[in-house]
Image (spheres, rainbow, N blue to C red):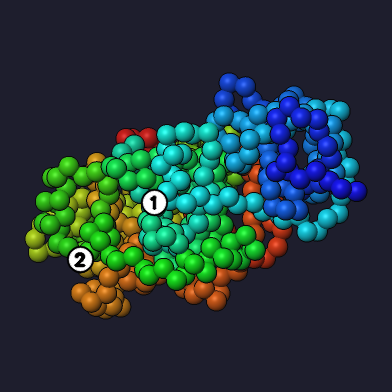
Amino acid sequence: MAFQRVRDIKEGEESGTIEIRVLKKWISKGKNEELCYQFVDACGDCIEATANVKDIEHFDSNIQLLSCYKVSGYIAIGCRTYMATVDHSASLVIGKKAKFDPAHDLSIPDVYFNFATYDALKNRLKNARLLTDYIGRVETNCLRTTRNGMILRKILIRDEMKKDVEITLWPDKAHLIGDKVIPGDIVAITSTSVTEYNGRLQLESTYLTNAFVNPDMPQTIDHIKRIMEVPAREPTARDDEMATLQHIKLISQQNIQTPKNFICKATIKSIHQDRTWYYVLCSKCGQKLYPQRRNNSLNFVCRDDDDIIPNFRYCVNATIEDPTGSTDTVFFNESMEAIVKISCEDVVNKHADTTNPKIVPEIIRSITNTTKLLNLTLKNDKQIVVNNVSNIASTPDTQSTSTVPGTSAFTPTTPVPKSTISKRTVIETPGQKDEARITDNKHRYYESYKYVNIFDDGNF
């Protein structure tokens, strides 16, 4: 039987029979919610399909993600005019009369990419109709804190045309790329929106975004070969640089448009005793937990979930100093674990006064008067945070080694050699977290955590 090619479907024409694999499923956001699917055929061409969200039970009983079907009885209409995931002039409307007969064509791809070029980004900045897939080599990877305490992940990638593009992963997507993704890794990211900041084009995650680290699928092989031939990016003033606290404070007096990173040799002068030193996340939804006292003990509850396990994360306020001056800062989870060599959860359970989260335990107070090499970030709001820490004796010669966030200039808390990291494919249904499916053992998918202040005192 000859099947109609997906790319040949045109708005208003009579439907034929297509043989496709169901790649994604999501519910569109906006005034009119729709049940959405992404279909791909054996030629690698893709098209979106929409259905009435009220019929979700009907379609869930007839359509399984990643399964193949012979589809007929659809209606071909124009493409979506906002946040389309596929560059196609048409899309499909499917109702209860649409037929989905199981098929078994193993040649149909199980992933779809439509990588944009850098030159195409400017047009998409003006027209938000089409979301953007992009691929490149990681140059920097680090967390950034907004003025209201929201933690974003910023990844700078270089594409095959030697163009550098910054990717912002908002908190709901920050888990897609974790700290173990380092410079030299390849990242393929899908369904991002194009924005502009300080005259530079950048990509931002949407609720449909997914990411693949070091993908080795047929659709990415040629891109990766070309990317690996591109020379590494030269370090710039935006990358980490050795600095004194006096120098950092002078820069903080300027009008800072983007966060700046520094390496500083400093002594931890004091730990602030009047501030909470940790925050807690829900093990199910990843949102903040709220403290609730019960029988002289401190418990944590989630507004949405029961039967949860609290996920404790460090957030220690301190004062640091060097021969040129002193400043207040915040040590986050990775930096504190690098110093005390014990998880925040263990400190809370074994060393802390659980009735008062503002009483700093001795194991944390004991780090005062120790000198470390600190990875500092000066944020737009002038706050200075510590992202990583290493001992002076184990640190390479920082005068001769240029470093960027995520590189090996700091002794990591756990080894991360590439040969020991498993690779697996994760195919996520955007907006439907519970339906994420792991289909083989090819690609890495890492999780990090969202930093929030559980006590809502306006500061960390």
Residue beneath label 2, please?
Answer: 242
Q: Is 60 above or below relative to 318?
A: above
The kind of residue tagged 2 is Met
Give how far across and how far down residue 392 sits, in percent.
25, 74
In the rendered image, residue 116, in percent from the top left (x then y), is placed at 50, 50
Disc 1 designates what residue? 166
Q: Secondary structure at mark 1?
A: strand
Q: Residue at x 20, y 54 (%)?
A: 319
The residue nearer to you, when weighing 38 against 265, is: 38
Side of 96 relative to 175 (left or right): right
Tell me: residue 359, above or below residue 342: above
Residue at the spot 9% in from the left edge and 64% down from the top edge:
323
Q: On screen, 94 above or below 277?
A: above
Q: Which mark is residue 2?
A: none
Residue 328 at x, y percent in the picture: 20, 50
Kindly identify the residue that appears in the image at 29 percent across and 43 percent down: 199
Quadrant in the rendering for residue 380: top left
Q: Nearer the viewer, mark 2 or mark 1?
A: 1
Residue 419 shows in this picture:
yes
Q: Quadrant of residue 37?
A: top right
Residue at 24 percent of width and 43 percent of height: 257
SS label for mark 2 = strand
Instruction: Point out the image quarter for the C terminus.
Output: top left
Cα distance, mark 2 to mark 1? 23 Å
**Looking at the image, which is closer to me, 210 or 343?**
210
Q: Is residue 425 left or right of residue 303?
A: right
Of the image marks 2 and 1, the number of the one nearer the N terminus: 1
C-beta proximity under 8 Å, tags 2 and 1: no
Q: Amino acid at mark 1?
A: Glu
Q: Is residue 276 visible?
A: no
Closer-to-camera residue (316/438): 438
Q: Residues within 10 Å of mark 2 (few under 14, many from 20)?
A: some
